Image (cartoon, helix red, strand yellow):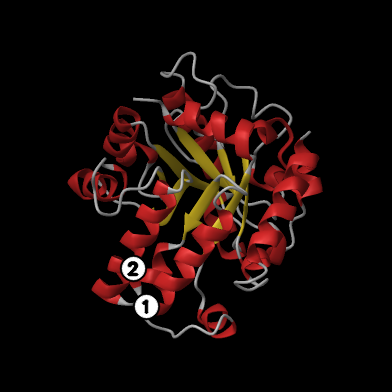
Amino acid sequence: MTAFGERLARVFDEQGRLCVGIDPHAHLLEAWGLPATADGVRSFGLTVVDAVAGRAGIVKPQVAFFERFGAAGYAALEEVLAAARAAGLLVIADAKRGDIGTSVTAYAEAWLSPGSPLEADAMTISPFLGVGSLADAMTLAQSAGKGLFVLAATSNPEAAAVQQAVVQSGPRAGQSVARAIIEDVDAINQQEAGAPYGSVGLVLGATVRLADYGIDVATAGERTPALPVLAPGFGHQGARVEDTRRVFGSLATGVIVSESRGLLGAGPKALAGAVERRTEEVRAAHG
């Protein structure tokens, strides 16, 4: 069993850092000439997988766009996940689950267990019931060679009040919530000595000023193993790949450049070319 951090390092080396979102928004389905049905999101997802395979290394299906069609939507998502993994892509399920006890364990089993119908290589997860509430999910991820990406400083402006708030008690007192999440995640990854990247990463928006969240980008990435960072906000939301090192500083070594609508807007026929160009742009920006 290969650790997630080793798999991520291999993808970075061989296929680059671009992550293409699989987000079948209603307006994109219409633009692509697809129905707003489970069959439509299935076709959309499989088309994205075909366009990305061999051109980039990571995809991120947004679960909600499939979930809205109920059981049929989940069946479509299962096909898309299986096709992406069969194509050799690293798959991050953008599920943003979070809970306590056996509930969060069940979520992790659904998305990260080998052989599960919804099996992905990693999932996004919410820590706002306490990072400690994710312990079982982290244990499962590490034992199965899977990854977690923990929400910390997200790109939606309404999250700032919570994520910039100062912790009032405990060992992280005086730190921002976002900074405390980073420190807790880093402490967990320290158990994976020798790995290039930890199994547990962060979601840090590429459109936010991380200093406003109490995060010193000059030193935050000086960790071993390095912190993987899923960075949404590129393309349509305004972040530019050439600014990655400036925005993320020492964290840039682990950044996954995530883009959805900016690429998907190219349409089904032009998507492969758009992905190929973007992959090269990201590679050039990271040296």
State the residue in front, 206 or 16.
16
Mark 2 Cα shell of 10 Å, populated few (<14), some (14-19), many (≥20): many
Instruction: Give left or right: position of 49 versus 93.
Output: right
In this rendering, the answer to whether 135 lies above or below 130 is above
Is residue 252 in sight in this rendering? yes
State which quadrant residue 251 falls in: top right
In this rendering, the answer to whether 181 lies above or below 119 is above
The label shown at residue 59 is none
State the residue in front, 34 or 26.
34
Amino acid under disc 2: Ala
The label shown at residue 76 is 2
Instruction: Give left or right: position of 207 versus 39.
Output: right
The residue drawn where x is 39% and y is 55% is: 83
Q: How far apart are labels 2 and 1 at the CA level? A: 7 Å
State the residue in front, 220 or 141.
141
The picture places residue 44, in percent across and down from the top left corner, at 48, 71
The picture places residue 91, in percent across and down from the top left corner, at 45, 48
The residue drawn where x is 74% and y is 62% is: 238
Instruction: Give left or right: position of 55 versus 277.
Output: left
Element type at marker 1?
helix
Q: Which residue is mark 1?
A: 39
> Which badge, 2 or 1, comes first in the chain's sequence?
1
